[in-house]
Amino acid sequence: MAGDDVAFAGVAGQIELVRSGAVSARELVEVSLSRIERIDPELNSFAAVYGERALQEADEADARVAKGHFGPLIGIPIAVKDEIDIAGEVTSRGTGAYTTAAPADAEVVRRLRAAGAIVIGKTKMPELGLWPFTESITWGVTRNPWDLERTPGGSSGGSAAAVAAGLVPAALAADGAGSIRIPAACCGLFGLKPQRDRVPMTPHFADGVQWVVFGTVTRSVVDTGVMLDVLSTQSPGFAQAARTPPGSLRVGVVRGFPVGAPGKLSSEVSASLDRTADLLGSLGHTVVEQKIDMRPQDAAVILGLIFRFVRDLVLEVERPQRLERRTRAFARPGALVSDRTKERLRRGQDRLAERLGRLFDDHDVLLTPMMSEPAVAAGIMEGRGATATYFWESGWVPFTVLWNVTGQPAASVPAGFSSHGLPVAVQIVGRPNHESTLLSLAAQIEAERPWSDRRPAVAAT
């Protein structure tokens, strides 16, 4: 099998190749390292690559395979977003404000290694993961494999760019307000935000409003299921869910912007939502229009908690003087959110979550836009301040943060391409603890309109 075909086989495909003896773990790692060397100078997706270490670990994996010892991810090269600890490495979180190496692997990294995966490097992100693009003074601009003049999204943009370009079959990512789903949508990948507490978060920096979860970006739905089975603290069987029909579901289609979010859907995004709703109806699901009951005070609750969360992040960095001016400015309003105010805002968050939860009395799944338009130009907010950047992103990606507030699972599902060849996506949101429903439904969509066979032009360079 040609190297490009191996690179784009995905997690499940590469596992079968290793198990069958068609390729070795060393060959998988060599393919990945070769593609990173050739392609990543254009993308700028990796913050660090552990070539010699990865080859050594691949040889060790091949020795285990020769003895008949197969882990769930034996020999599979995986990238790790640079806000997740790797022992002996500085976890930069997109900034030069950290200098101390992590004393141990994060639990998710430990689980990957225990399953036989090989950590091949760390991927880039915006400073402290604050923005839906992947650009920073420390690490430069990360670019979208489908169009190098566009952003891969953020904050897990390095992870998404690396997977979309076939540099690795999967990458660890994190999502605090859409940071798995937005890059997946920009790069034509499947991106599932798991249920809160599904994947262990230890050790991690300040959890603030507890909206951040760890997960992955992958080329296919079943690949995400395989990864979640390894990472999950409970309820394995996610890969099987991706191989099981969902049955007839009640789907609510949400088109309107949340309260406080400016903007409107582009015609191509609106059309992709219509096509997906029509497809789901043709597959036997009950599809109805639905509105989200949000009130003006809900936007104030979310914004207040975000401000306090960012302030807490900034207070924890080792060298705050190295932070970008925009980051420091975004943190300042958080000083006005006292502990007492934070608790009041959290009660407001709980009321919002309860109200949103009532939508699922009548629906199994919600279908929403992912973004108001496909991937925007890289550098679109270069030189702009915190306030301008926040209000701009509120118009581009307002559909994701609500499900971090509630903690329930949500996923970005590819929904075709724009007239300019950019990926378009929709979001599906499930009941609490129902990742399996989203995986089953997304796999059904994938079977009807496959996406993982398409490759960006940069991947062939």
Image (cartoon, rainbow, N blue to C red):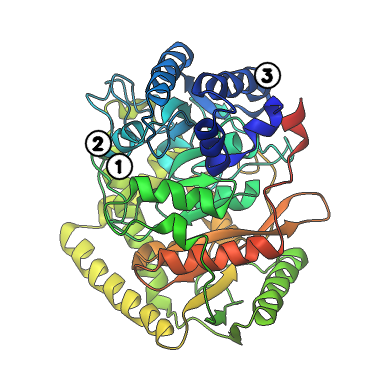
Is residue 104 visible to the viewer in this orientation of the structure? Answer: yes
Up/down of 252 relative to 81, above or below:
below
Secondary structure found at label 3: helix
Q: Which residue is mark 2?
A: 316
- Residue 460 appears at what percent x and percent y? 76, 29
Q: Residue furthest front?
A: 67
Q: Which residue is located at x 22 percent, y 62 percent?
A: 342
Label 1 crowding class (10 Å Cα cut-off): few <14, some 14-19, many 20+?
some
Q: What is the quadrant of the C terminus in the image? A: top right
**Horizontal placement of 195 versus 264: left or right?**
left
Q: What is the quadrant of the N terminus in the image? A: top right
Instruction: Say which of 127 and 109 sits in front.
Output: 109
Instruction: Say which of 242 and 278 sits in front.
Output: 242
Instruction: Report the amino acid beneath label 2.
Output: Glu
Q: Which residue is located at x 28 percent, y 29 percent?
A: 105
Q: Which residue is mark 1?
A: 313
